[in-house]
Amino acid sequence: MVKLRLKRCGRKQPVYRIVAIDVRSRREGRDLRKVGFYDPINNQTYLNIPAILFFLEKGAQPTGTVYDILKKAGVCFYRISS
């Protein structure tokens, strides 16, 4: 199963990539594809909407935080809780 998850990149300041990753991988593990960027300090977000929708259509589940980021950006989908 694939999840849309945050992957930390910043060492001193928290900066995250939004990635599609296998559930069994660790947080910093190898991702399938980078689909976005999130900077909570400067409140900046970049989303690759076509790639995100592709993974959501294939059954990928976003984590809670990624779900909130996508909801704030206006990406329309239904979350299936597991």
Image (cartoon, rainbow, N blue to C red):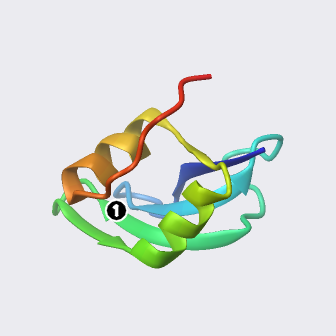
Position of residue 54 relative to residue 29, above or below, is below
> Which one is in front, 33 or 74?
74
Residue flagged by tag 1: what amino acid is it? Tyr
Please identify the quarter of the rendering in which residue 73 is found: bottom left
In the image, is 29 to the left or to the right of 34? right
Picture coordinates of residue 49, whole percent (x, y): 40, 73
The residue that label 1 is drawn on is 38
Residue found 39% across the figure and 61% down from its top: 15
> Which one is in front, 76 or 10?
76
Which residue, as the protein is rendered here, is positioned at the far left?
42
Which residue, as the protein is rendered here, is positioned at the far right?
24
Picture coordinates of residue 5, whole percent (x, y): 55, 49
Picture coordinates of residue 28, whole percent (x, y): 68, 54
Picture coordinates of residue 7, whole percent (x, y): 55, 55
In the image, is 27 to the left or to the right of 23? left
Task: Tell me the crowding category of disc 1: few under 14, some 14 to 19, or many 20 or more residues within 10 angstroms, Cα based.
Answer: many
Position of residue 3 relative to residue 19, above or below, is above
Q: Quadrant of the N terminus?
A: top right
Q: Quadrant of the C terminus?
A: top right
In the image, is 38 to the left or to the right of 50? left
